[in-house]
Amino acid sequence: MFDLLLYGVWPYVAFALAISGGLYRYYRDRFSYSSFSSQLLEGQQLFWGSVPWHYGIAILLIGHLIGLAIPGGVAAFNGLPLRLYILEIAASGLGLFALLGIVMLIARRMSVPAARSVTSRMDAVLLALLLFQVLAGLYTALFQRWGSWWYLSNAVPYLSSLLRLNPDVQYAATLPLITQLHTINAFLLVAIFPFSRLVHIFTIPVTYLWRPYQTVIWNLRAREDRKG
């Protein structure tokens, strides 16, 4: 019964909160979709934390999604030991990269007055959950070896069963404890998504990727007139 609540009910509750909370916030206070950055006050320190964090966590998330979308392809890739070693080392390296970033971002929030002044309780909770998520994932990669194999054999069937609205909780219940906590915490992050600064990912200007280029024309004649 406890496993059913954690792995069969909680994921749907988390996504329901994320969707309903996100819609409510968008229509009631859409201008709050921001990270309230103090980058202009101390951009260099933010850079050294933000870059490893965003790149590390983004690539890891993409890797998780690839395993979920094409498990057969990932299994075939892991069929050769050398490629399996490369994948495991790369995942561990990205985990360390993301850990470095989140630690530096937390240190910035604690040590820089400008950043600390705009840090709310929800920010502190979010940073703690993100730190735990990275540590749990990194521990799994380093001490629960060949995670990419049992991710395919346990996590993927479990997540697929959730998508089919027929959760098979036994797949999740048999995972190592730290990985179970990693899974539960992931859904907790989903649940608080619309109530935290995580919503700022919707403000990323992705339209720049397909927006027509702009031509900048300098008025040289006007500049020469000013000089004269």
Image (tube, rainbow, N blue to C red):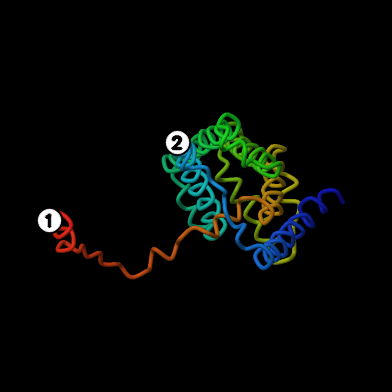
Task: Return the x and y of residue 201 as percentages of the image width and height.
Answer: 54, 55
Q: Which of the marked residues, 2 or 1, is nearer the chain's N terminus?
A: 2
Residue 43 in which image quadrant:
top left
Residue drawn at (67%, 68%) of the image:
27
SS type, badge 1:
loop
The numbered disc on residue 48 is 2
Residue 176 in which image quadrant:
top right
Task: Return the x and y of residue 173 as percentages of the image width and height.
Answer: 75, 46
What residue does disc 1 label? 228
Relative to 190, does residue 99 appear above or below in the rendering? above
Q: Are marks 2 and 1 in contact (CB under 8 Å)?
A: no
Q: Nearer the viewer, residue 193 or 124?
A: 124
SS type, badge 2:
helix
Which residue ends up furthest to the bottom in the rendered image? 212
Which is in the foreground here, disc 2 or disc 1? 1
Amino acid type assigned to the residue bearing label 2 in the image = Trp
Q: Specify whether 225 is left or right of 1.
A: left
Q: Specify whether 123 is left or right of 222.
A: right
Q: CA distance from mark 2 to mark 1?
A: 46 Å
Residue drawn at (50%, 41%) of the image:
53
Amino acid type assigned to the residue bearing label 1 in the image = Gly
Task: Return the x and y of residue 101 as percentages of the image width and height.
Answer: 51, 36
Q: How many marks?
A: 2
Q: Specify whether 152 is left or right of 87.
A: right
Residue drawn at (81%, 49%) of the image:
3
